[in-house]
Amino acid sequence: MKQTPGSRFTKAWFLGATVVSLILLVVFLVSIVIRRFNGDEGIIGEWAYWLAKNGEARSMLYYSYFGEKALSLPIYHKFYTILLSGMIEVFGFQLFFLRIPSLLAFGGIILLSSIYLRDKKVELFPWYIILGFFLSQSLVFNFAFVARPELLMAFLALAVFISLRKFSITKDWRWALSAGIISGLSFYTHLNGLAIIAAAGLFLLFHFQWKAIFAFGLSAFALASLFVVDIPGTYMGLLNELSQAPDVKNSSFSLGRVLMKIVYEHERFFHNAGLAVFSLATFLSLAFTWKQQYKQNSDLLIFTILLVFSLSLITHGKTPKYMLIYIPFMGLIILHAIHFLLSAQSKIKLLVLSLFLVAGAGISIGNYLKDYPYFVAVEARNQAMGAQMVKGATVLAHNGFVFGQMEQFEIRSPIVFFFTNEGFTKNEYDDSFEYLNFARKENYDYVAIDLLLERKEIREIFDDERFRAGDSLAGYKLFYKDADFMVFKRLKTGNSGL
């Protein structure tokens, strides 16, 4: 029988939760139309553009770093890029439609969470409260409509767990097979899927059955192998390619360093205010309801711990966006705690927990509104900046310049500068010279700087009054400048502008 709110306190809680959820939903719907551009969307979008156009992913943005390898990338978010290329085939190369898969994945998380809670006889929460609850986590609010694969990975991780839980209940090896297929697909989507495979495999050891382990291992390996079929040397080739990646090749993989990655994984949970609030809400939920959680949700707790352990081992750094893979599980822990506390009418504990969630909702909305100056039409800005340059030229510009300009220019990413240089000195003149000198050495025809969308480090050294139209520096002439853009054009050889 469906549970319904009973006491006056419970009714008041549900009224408050409904109001907050509806406010979050309205703001989120507005954000779908009016939203800040994420620089990674240009990088991934370009992969998908070339995959749709030529049948293979390219990275011309990074051509100056990868060389000929950029013409046929061996490593990228393959299944996710295939999804985006399909969107391009149907709707064209438009940023809005590249974000749709993340929105669908978010909807899938809400659906699976509802199914899981219903199976656990937790039927207090209507879908809109579950939706609002997850939107109160600022990272989810942001990435639910961003062209990156993290929410898809979170959805796949949750789907794997639900399959494994079905296996733990029924002992039917076909649920393990399902978990293996989804786990392998997660690796095909993003290399962090290795953490999902590891967590799922370890989870099966708690419910040991040879047939299930064999079914899981074989299916996970088969799907994961799709990632390496086009890499010479398959898995060994993948390891070789990874060792050359700019964010990996200078890293240490000593045993001590690997173990410290586990010790410091907590840094990811408290990377920013939104994550800190949600993490504290999770830990409080465990503290307030540990006996019930341990007795009724042991599978959820075990899988979550294994996932945290696995991801901490394989990831480079503590980037917060990878935290999204944990969020569905942390969310289910909190929702279970709310259910237990409502049943026990533990008003003080529930009030404390609710205050954290309301704070999270405020952070989500506040972070969104804080981005107000960046709510611009990227394609329109790109067209305005592109109009100042000769078509067919090679341009050093922000990653988002690919939208609407891929057919017009050869576009190179400023990130290559940071891969190949030690960084800025904080002396504006020296840094601006170094940046332009890098472009000159790479024979870029133009250096185009969007004073709103360009990387912060670059905007800071050029966004001042030192540069006026007509000035020359490091072989470039600033031939166009207004409140939005600066466009440097390479001078002919012999006129360096020094």
Image: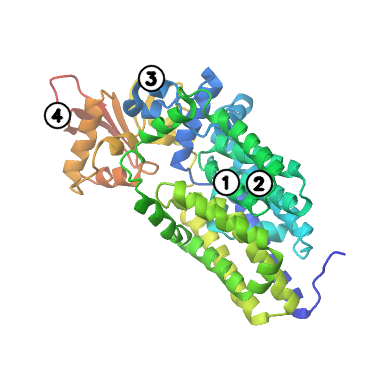
In primary-sequence order, the first of circles 2 and 3 is 2
Asked if the residue at tag 1 contacts the one at tag 2, i.e. Cβ–Cβ closer than 8 Å, the answer is yes
Q: Can you give x and y, in whole percent of width and height, for residue 124 in the image?
A: 77, 65
Question: x and y percent of residue 322 in the render?
Answer: 50, 49
Position of 98 relative to 233 (above/below):
below
**Residues tagged 1 and 3 counted as in contact (Cβ below 8 A):** no
Q: Is residue 173 above or below residue 335?
A: above
Residue 427 visible in the shown view: yes
Identity of the residue drawn at 39% across and 23% down: 69
Q: Disc 4 marks which residue?
A: 497
According to the picture, the residue beneath numbered tag 1 turns out to be 196
Three-letter code, disc 3: Lys
Q: Who's the residue at 51% across and 34% down the image?
A: 77
Along the line of sight, the residue nearer the viewer: 422 or 379: 422
Compute the Cα span from label 2 to label 1.
Answer: 8 Å
Cβ–Cβ below 8 Å for labels 4 and 2? no
The image quadrant of residue 412 is: top left
* Horizontal arrangement in the rendering, residue 38 relative to residue 67 (left or right): right
Residue that badge 3 annotates: 391
Q: CA distance from mark 1 to mark 4?
A: 54 Å
Instruction: Report which residue position mark 2 lands on.
Output: 160
Q: Secondary structure at mark 3?
A: loop
Q: Quadrant of the N terminus?
A: bottom right
